Amino acid sequence: MERKITLPITKEFVCNLNSGDYVYLTGTLYSARDAAHKRMIETLAAGGELPIPIKNQTIYYLGPTPAKEGQVIGSAGPTTSTRMDKYTPTLIELGITGMIGKGKRSEAVIDAMKKYHAVYFAAVGGAGAFLSKCIVKAEIAAYEDLGAEAIYKLEVKDFPVIVVIDDKGENLYNQEKISLSSK
Amino acid sequence: MRIIHTDEITKNIREMCIEANVSLSEDVKKRVLSAKEKEESALGKRVLEQLEENLAIAENEQIPICQDTGMAVVFLAVGQEVRIEGTAIEDAVNEGIRQGYRDGYLRKSVVSDPLLRENTKDNTPGIIHYSIVPGENIEIIVAPKGFGSENTSRILMLKPADGIEGVKQAVLETVKLAGPNACPPMIVGVGIGGDFEKCAILAKKALTRNLDTPSPFPHIRELEKELLEEINKTKIGPGGLGGKVTALGLNIETYPTHIAGLPVAINLCCHVNRHVKRVL
């Protein structure tokens, strides 16, 4: 099913999204990748506050290239989500409802998505130039010292993604069962 | 004896880093653009269309094809009749990378220590592979490598008894384990033989070979063809969302090995298989 949705999204809304849906996202979201995730989780562990709002937010696993003069942002495709798995269940528990990346997620992440109602979208890996055209505004929201790994607040318009894993635990990547034993 | 100044090396590497990141070589581009005709999955076709549009935007606007503009891998084949003047060659190469990544608005993705992880902010150092060859030229290959696919690459120290079947199984298993994480459709570089590190370098080198130039050895050429077909039967498909096009090409490089060993390295690369070659 093809649909357009506006971010941020609530837990209740997440229940309406199903694995396999082709979705165009419009609204506000935050980018964060390895180093930003690590720092956020360490901050929480030390009793600190997160530098961005988390409830009902969507996190895009992204580290863009620098913007040229006149560009909103440089090339801006998804990075591999699997590397964020260690940190993700905590952020889901704290209220994020959406994630955009590419690649597999761990059982722990999927369990948290089912329990707290979150959705995992995939954008097309390697389409960074194309996807940058769907980002209409970008500003650094936190951790500027991390360079390419800083957290950006982004405004997107008709940003194309596919629901890979929904809050029922349905996973599009598993539709073609891949057996390692078969040649 | 021919004299080449290191400024020439720096200047070329700067340009090559930028060129590699905004446009693909003709052989790779051709495979990406023709993949759509082979794909039967509707979602797979959609992914391929987006990649096609992406390549056009990147080339027209001279912006990176992918935001992971990679770690700069540089193969330098230095003719033994060349005398290099100027600075240390390693510094010249890294200066080229520094300038290319700055002036090309490429992402700085290198950390200085693998555990302390502080960004060097200029994408240096690169990974440099030197070889000394006959002649009075310097051949440079710049191959910026993204780590989404690099992280899914593997080395296996097989036994001689594992033979060709063992090699096939190792390659297919690596592709299946990688699945959507390596950003399919991918290009597969395979190194067979040598020792532990040699086979890894062969696999990387295989990725830089023109996809329209099969191996000169008949049995390896057969293996390249068969493995590509087998990979495309896994149905991983574009974006890992299912489909017929999982890999666009597969190259194998080989080297003599020890009587006790059969090392195999599989270096996976997404469709953004960047490599530019120049001869100074």
Image (tube, coloured by chain):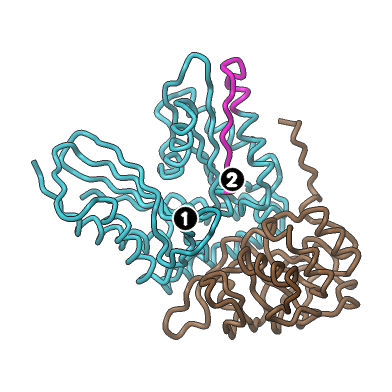
Q: Which chain is cyan?
A: B
Above or below: residue A78 compared with residue B182: below
- Which quarter of the picture shows residue A26? bottom right
Let me know if residue B275 is in the magenta part. Answer: no
Q: Position of residue A8 (x, y in %)?
A: 77, 82
Residue under pointer 1: B29
> Hey, what amino acid is under mark 2?
Ala
**Mark 2 falls on what kind of element?**
strand
**Mark 1 falls on what kind of element?**
helix
Instruction: Decide which of A101, A148 is in the foreground and name it.
Output: A148
Q: Position of residue B227 (x, y in %)?
A: 59, 33
Dot 1, crowdedness within 10 Å: few (<14), some or many (≥20)?
some
Let me know if residue B157 is in the magenta part. Answer: yes
Instruction: Look at chain A in the picture and name its colour.
Output: brown
Gap in angstroms between the C-alphas marked 1 and 2: 13 Å
> Hey, what amino acid is under mark 1?
Lys
Which of the two discs, 1 and 2, labels the residue nearer the N terminus? 1
**Residue bounds of the magenta highlight:** B151-167
Task: Residue at 41% x, 42% y: name it.
Answer: B209
Task: Residue at 73% x, 54% y: name it.
Answer: A104
Residue under pointer 2: B247
Instruction: Decide which of B251, B225 is in the foreground and name it.
Output: B251
- Which quarter of the picture shows residue B130? top left
**Relative horizontal placement of residue A151, taking residue A120 as reference (left or right):** left
- The chain containing the residue under callout 1 comes to B
- The chain containing the residue under callout 2 comes to B
